[in-house]
Amino acid sequence: MTKKMDRRSFLKVGGGIAAVATVNANAIPLVGEGLLNDKEDGFSASHFGAVVTHTRNSRFESVTPFEGDAHPVTLIEGLAARTYATDRIMYPCVRESYLKNGYKSDKTKRGSEKFVRVTWETAYDLIANELKRVYKDFGADAIFGGSYGWFCVGSLNNPQALVARMLGIAGGYTSRTCTYSTHAIRQITPYVTGTDESSAQSTVYPVIIENSECIVFWGADPINTNQIAWGVPDHQSYTYMKELKETAKKRNIKFYIIDPVYNNTGVYFGAEHIQIRPTTDVALMLGMAHYLYSENLYSKEFVDKYTTGFEEFRKYLMGESEDMIPKTAEWASTICGVPTDVIKVLAKEFVSKRTMLMGGWGTQRAHHGEQPNWMMITLASMLGQIGLPGGGYGMNYHYSDGGVPMPAAATGNALSDKPLNGSVGAVADAENVAASPGLSGISINSKMEGPWKQRKINVIPVSRIVECLENPGKEYNFDGKAYKYPELKMAYWAGGNPFHHHQDRNRMVKAWQKLDTFVVNECFWTASARMADIVLPATTEQERNDITKSHSNSYIFAMKQTIKPVGEATDDFDIFVNILRRFGANEVLAFTEGKTKMQWVESFYEESYTKAIKSGVKMLPFKEFWEKGFVKFDTPESAKKFIKHGKFRQNPVINRLGTPSGKIEIFSKKIAGYNYKECKGHPMWFEPMEWLGSKVAKEFPLNLVSPHPKYRLHSQLNNTWLRDLEEVEGREPIWMHPKDAEKRGIKNGDIVRIFNKRGQVLGGAVVTEAVMQGVVRMQEGAWYDPSEPGKVGTLCRHGDVNVLTPDVGTSELAQGNQATALVEIEKFKGEVPEIGIFKAPKIKGF
Amino acid sequence: MRLFSIIAPLCAATMMFAASGSYLSKNAPLYAEASESSVLGELIIASEVKELSQKGSFSEVEFVGFVPEGSTVVYEKAGMLIIGFEASNLSVLKVLGKKTDEYGSVWINVSVKGFVKTDALSSDKSKVLGTGKALFQAKCGTCHALHPESEFDANVWPSILEAMGVQAGLAKAEKQSIEKYLQNFQP
């Protein structure tokens, strides 16, 4: 008698806790209830776009783009791919000697030692006990909960907010301020224009399309970087960029790209390439400013009426102060490499045409990164077009659909409010209530009463983490004040990959040894997970229910669980609840506020729904929204007219800026009063620590730039087949100019070793004229693959560019991070080593 | 003797109204009379006013502040974008004087008198700011890490909230409540 093998029994045989390390050990039924398809139209979202998900036989196989995505991107292919990546973390693991000796373990073994599989209970006990020990012996400041990174989308399962929420309840932590994206620009521009120019609204595309005559992409690549967004991108910026290109044909708009690399944006718009040496943009701008001033071409009226401090700056410009050198176009040319006559032509062009300067964030990710944006605003002031339609500057067109008109903020009553104080958000009108109520998410602070309410959370500037580890108790300057670094004993990272985004990898590996305990929640065996003491497997976005919105506020999206979590992957939310169980019932209640996960999701929607209805904005009730997958909000016509600084230009007295003078501060008394050595009262050229004109260039004559990748979100998706679209012989590509390659006997496709005093990495050579001579370009985010993990100075076999970059702050003001370096390159000699990542490390089972 | 017995209670009554600080516990319209009729403008949460008298459910109050020439937005202090009162039009503001700051900006010292619902007033400024704190924590730390209150100064926070307010779908009252909390923050 044969046992009838029905579907249910088939599943039972393979099911249960996987005893082995692979993702696919469960026997999958060949056919489901339906013919091959289990769940056709699921719905979810990501930093790459919203998607319809397709599952067959409980396998998340593929996605198709959301119908409302204006320009779907290839990155969404990575969602299914990474769910089943061969380096998925399957169960909790502890580093072998940490399991034996706890915080007294040999930290130099991090990264090289094998892991031991443990039960969740063991893992939670270890973490909770260690938290308690550190709180007792060292205090709350000793735990770093800053957990920087790009994680996932979703209002509830936001790993960064959740780890902070958990730690805040458990006993406290040290957090961080600033970001690796905007460390310098966010600190300097409030002094100049009274706002954070990285997030201030830019003139919208419809106005540019109608009015701009000259558009300058200055250290920016909007065609590439708008693939992703901090919220969910709906890619409307691509629709506008297409329209801009079409208009340019009819109306003759001139495009320039000022960049060491002729990037995607330059190619798309057929822009004229102004090749500039990395980190010398301030010199170019000074040269242009000098020419405009000397030829009396600059807008004296604008400078007099709308700025303050031009006289102090003029002295510096004309060589009457500081270094006593006139910042002529000739002077600028020797520094930045742009020919003198070109500098003069550009200045004439920008001032005579309606010009929009689109500044990226690459220029400020450099030594003295405070200067480029300050100087760009100064130059724009001299051009005199700030506040005119299609003129002036904008510093976020490259980020998360900057420049795209957005729905108004729903106000809770049907008529929107008059604009406040000069700046203006879109105003909805009674006939066309086109607004969005926004969407809340889980807070780092619990609503429940308890000792956590009184806790003060101290911060460090995010990119000073290694300096902090190296120098506990040391005083440092930041934004006008002096602070002391805390002594960190433990770090808990969730939703971030510091062994990707932080600079000077070898120095970091060494400094990390100062931590007694490093805990990581991760989906994959990233470089950070490999360096951890305790690793907990987390679910991906598609393995849980959540809710999110598009960055443009045009949509709220349902994120519906597509499949059950792979292996023992657990929601960060549940992980933190379980850790808090080891503290007490009150702590658990403070974290959950008595709500289930789905109740949380529904509560975020209900909050928006209530506000929308009160404002006269239509929204589906929750059940229907969840069924459909999304709700849409309209954008009012008034939003398509927004002009940055328009109100300020109309009346700078009434609509004064948030600066002490109410005007654009070319000279800042406040900053001058700090008496900093490397950031003074007005924008200046400071020689970078490493640049093509420095002594360091004798030994390391190639200037490395590290832009955002095309087929990743920083380091995300590197562990999927998408890397095959670009890798060269399994390594991150590095672009070299033909002359530089020829000089070194390097041919297209060769594996090369890139090195300087800080470290060495392998890369795959791409020989191209898209990069200027003397410059090499390697995208950030390729996963660190140390030949000898944990050993300082070891070769990275894969191409982690941050092995080469310096970890020195921009200046005393912003203490920001850098993204360039001087390097040398040679063809790799000897047998090319295999890549050691994209698979699990050695793990001892039960 | 008789005069004294009349004056003394009057003085006591005036002292009662002028003694404790009165703060707006929420944005509230300022009416010309003790009824919800003609509106002189809107008093903004956490602004300080002087209570003059009581009429039914309304309090007669006076707000004193500084305004740039031609503007209807009156600030609590000269040189700081801390909004105290948004006038419906210029004529409701009474000019008390002028002063010029070190940057040559002219600040007109103005006052306005009117009636506000008594339930819109509170003597506890820190409690009023507490509602802004709760909103700040609820609304401003979900998409990105909650910024320290001291990251930007009182002059800069308004422009940040203008940009972020759209992202977070903040209503005007919510935005201004958060703004006042941040602008009044002392480390």
Image: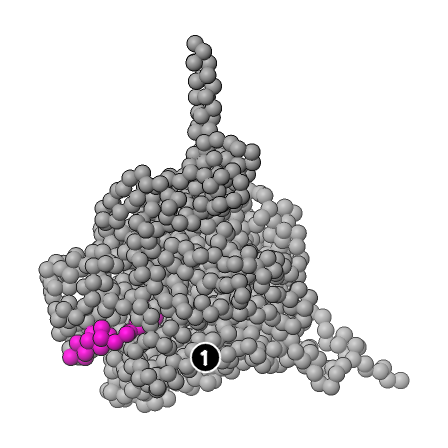
Judged left or right of residue B24, residue A591 is right
Amino acid at the residue labelled 1: Thr
Residue A629 image offset from top left, x and y in percent: 63, 71
Residue A723 image offset from top left, x and y in percent: 47, 81
Q: From what the image shows, is residue B128 above or below residue A720?
A: above
Judged left or right of residue A117, residue A816 is left
**Residue under the image location 53 percent in, 74 percent down:** A49
Q: From what the image shows, is residue A243 above or below residue A656?
A: below
A684 or A782, nearer to the observer: A684
Mark 1 residue element = helix
Q: Residue furthest right?
A: A1
What is the image's colouring? one colour
Q: From what the image shows, is residue A767 above or below residue A76?
A: below
Q: Residue furthest top?
A: B1
The magenta-colored residue range is A341-364
A73 or A747, nearer to the observer: A73
| Residue A11 in sight here | yes
**Residue under the image location 31 percent in, 87 percent down:** A768
Q: From what the image shows, is residue A191 above or below residue A238?
A: above
Residue A166 image offset from top left, x and y in percent: 56, 53
**Residue under the image location 84 percent in, 82 percent down:** A4
Quadrant of image for the C terminus of chain A: bottom right
Judged left or right of residue A712, residue A285 is left
Quadrant of image for the N terminus of chain A: bottom right
What chain is tagged by disc 1? A
Is A351 contained in the magenta span? yes
Judged left or right of residue A750, residue A544 is right
Residue to which mark 1 is pinned:
A239
**Residue under the image location 24 percent in, 44 percent down:** B100
Is A289 contained in the magenta span? no
Q: How many marks?
A: 1
Residue A42 image offset from top left, x and y in percent: 65, 75
